[in-house]
Image (cartoon, grey):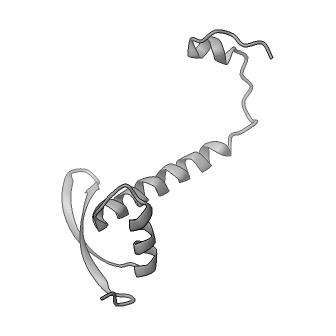
Amino acid sequence: MSVPGLAMQMNGTYHLHEEADVRTTLNIDDAALAGAMKTARGKTKTAVINEALHEYARRRRVRRLLEFRGRAHWDGNLDDLRGRARVDR
């Protein structure tokens, strides 16, 4: 049975100066977690939440990179850079 707003204990690893396991109490939306559990690769709550955190951080990094779009000039050939045959377009 699921109780809305139920606090659950989870183990997480935080990388500050030293690697350490830290037990944290989180209040997680049951419906959001259930939806994530259905679509995520991970099969445990911990794995799904860790996957979500990694994806969140990746998207934020990409968003910051996109802020530089159009601000730099590059002369080169992407096909040469990637080592593939040139395609005339």
Report the front residue among 34 and 83: 34
| x 60%, y 14%: residue | 81
Q: Residue furthest left?
A: 20
On the picture, is 53 further left or further right than 59? left
Q: Is residue 30 above or below residue 13?
A: below
Report the front residue among 66 and 18: 66
| x 39%, y 78%: residue | 28
Report the front residue among 32 and 72: 32
User: Where's residue 2, x and y in %?
Assistant: 33, 87
User: Where's residue 20, x and y in %?
Assistant: 19, 57
Based on the displayed image, in which of its 4 quarters is residue 51 positioned?
bottom left
On the picture, is 21 further left or further right than 16? left
| x 45%, y 71%: residue | 35
- Give the mark count: 0
Based on the displayed image, in which of its 4 quarters is residue 71 positioned?
top right
On the picture, is 4 further left or further right than 11? right
Q: Is residue 29 visible?
A: no
Based on the displayed image, in which of its 4 quarters is residue 66 positioned?
top right
| x 34%, y 90%: residue | 3
Q: Is residue 80 visible?
A: yes
> In which quadrant of the rendered image does the C terminus lie?
top right
Q: Is residue 35 above or below residue 68?
A: below
User: Where's residue 83, x and y in %?
Assistant: 56, 11
